[in-house]
Image: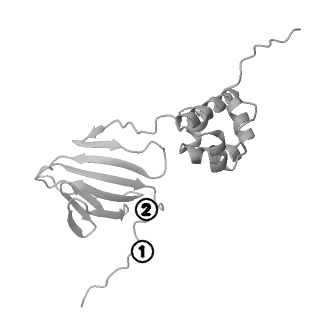
Amino acid sequence: MKEDSAVPATAPQQVLDGVGPRLRALRQQRRVTLAQLSSATGISVSTLSRLETGERRPTLELLLPLARVHQVTLDELVGAPATGDPRVHPRPVVRHGITFIPLTRRPGGVQAYKMIYPVAASDREPEQQTHEGYEWLYVLSGRLRLLLGEHDLTLGAGEVAEFDTRTPHWFNNPGPGPLEIISLFGPQGERLHVRARPATKRRASP
């Protein structure tokens, strides 16, 4: 059976075949001669010439100094395909008037949310809850009232709280405007390492 001589090149081969013309174009754009490029990279003129014509297979040892001299990344040098959109496209969820905006996509582990609280109804009684986990809160804007065990705290913009969610807790927005916070919540045992060392309990003064 006669073999088909027009077998299409594989994707990696197509990438390699495009390196030579790209190297030549970069050098010409910078108006650099092969001799000047050889002096800057330590690669011989003959090797550079063979790279540009496709007679020499590009290797990492050759491409690294060329990328440095041309001030481009390796991906740009070889024309690697895009790796996909790294942006997170969150879908807000509203529950009991609170807007939850997920900032992470990976299931399990620490989860990040932006949360927007309306001003709380003044007649609502605080009802502290407990559950497994560990939480870290950062106030972006507004005011946060946090009941944590026997503590009753009010946090403003730029302030942070972290606590074991097995401790009875409750928080809301005392007003006068909207409250926006960033919340990181993780399973029990996954500390967020915002302290240099664990805080020690202070003894009450007699």
Circle number at residue 192: 2
Q: Residues within 10 Å of mark 1 (few under 14, many from 20)?
A: few
Q: Residues within 10 Å of mark 2 (few under 14, many from 20)?
A: some
Residue under the image location 74 percent in, 35 percent down? 57
Position of 184 compared to 83: left or right?
left
Disc 1 to disc 2, C-alpha distance: 12 Å
Residue under the image location 38 percent in, 79 percent down? 200
Number of callouts = 2
Position of 116 compared to 121: left or right?
right
The amino acid marked with disc number 2 is Leu
Q: In x, y percent, where is residue 179?
A: 20, 51
Q: In x, y percent, where is residue 162?
A: 34, 63
Q: In the image, is residue 112 above or below residue 21?
A: below
Q: Secondary structure at mark 2?
A: loop
Mark 1 or mark 2, which has the lower sequence index? 2
Circle number at residue 1: none
The amino acid marked with disc number 1 is Pro
Residue 6 is at least partly visible in this image:
yes
Query: 105 or 23: which is nearer to us?
Result: 23
* Residue closest to the far right: 1
Residue 17: quarter of image: top right
Query: 155 or 19: which is nearer to us?
Result: 19
Residue 130 is at least partly visible in this image:
no
Position of 72 compared to 59: left or right?
left
State the quadrant of the C terminus: bottom left
Q: Secondary structure at mark 1?
A: loop
- Per the image, the residue denoted by label 1 is 198
Residue under the image location 15 percent in, 52 percent down? 124
Q: In x, y percent, where is residue 181?
A: 27, 52
Colouring rule applied to residues: one colour
Instruction: Say whether marks 1 and 2 touch (CB < 8 Å).
Output: no
Residue 96: quarter of image: top left
